[in-house]
Image (tube, grey):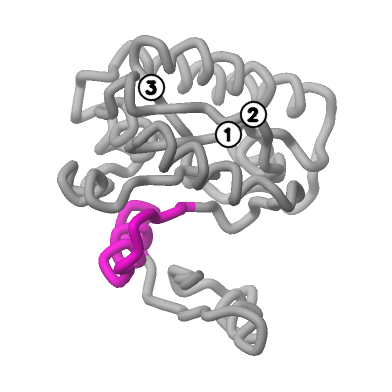
Amino acid sequence: MKVFVADARSTDDTADIARSFADRMDITVIEGGTPSVGRNRGAHQSDSEFVLFLDADVELRDPTLLRRALVRMKSQRLHCLTVDIACAGGNWMDRFLYRANSRMQRLSSWVMPFGTGMFLLFDRKRFTELGGFNENALFAEDFLLTKQISPLRFSVLKGEVFTSNRRFRRTGHARMVFLFFWTMLNSSNRSHFERDHGYWKEAPAAAE
């Protein structure tokens, strides 16, 4: 398995830490940028049948998850697959909102699929046909891409990956909920995704 780490000029030794796994993994650090740019660059260098996109703070605790995901992709000839998202730490509100997001993700998959960039497994050919992630998008680029997938070719696999509560620390619970529903209502408004909505402001140093 080839792993690409898109490093957007990080200052926390991300590149060096990634390279330290070179004795165990086929890993390459590439130049990143916005999430769309970094992900597209990694996918462009890949020649595999499937490409998996993960965020930097995601933990894959289930050792069977990737195998089961690939089996589902192949057996059902899917274009995209995701899983539930859980919070590795934080408070009860963080965990509740991630569970609510997972529930909405499953319900919407019957009509207009959406998945988060924390775990997106794509058929690489279909990913290329869709043009990859929109590099003009500064917000919810994952939603913008996955909503183009047919419900018949999209699946939410039983299982979960774990992420941090940095999004809530950075943006706040109420604003994250507002942005979620505002984005759903603006799903056909391309200009909505080309504004960052203040999402990329720095998070405070201490967790809630």
Q: CA distance from mark 1 to mark 3?
A: 12 Å
> Could you tell which of marks 2 and 1 lies nearer the N-terminus?
1
> Could you tell which of marks 3 and 2 lies nearer the N-terminus?
3
Residue 198 visible in image: no
Taking the spot 46% from the left edge, 43% from the top edge, the residue there is 120
Residue 38 visible in image: yes
Taking the spot 34% from the left edge, 40% from the top edge, the residue there is 141
Q: Is residue 33 left or right of residue 53?
A: left
Taking the spot 38% from the left edge, 54% from the top edge, the residue there is 50
> Could you tell which of marks 1 and 3 lies nearer the N-terminus?
1
Q: Which residue is mark 2?
A: 158
Q: Looking at the rendering, in which quadrant would you find the C terminus? A: top right
Q: Nearer the viewer, residue 56 or 124?
A: 124
Which percent across, then down, holds residue 106? Answer: 53, 17
Q: Which residue is mark 1?
A: 83
Q: Which residue is mark 3?
A: 113
Quadrant of residue 13 in the image?
bottom right
Q: How many marks?
A: 3
Q: CA distance from mark 2 to mark 1?
A: 6 Å
Q: Nearer the viewer, residue 101 or 111?
A: 111
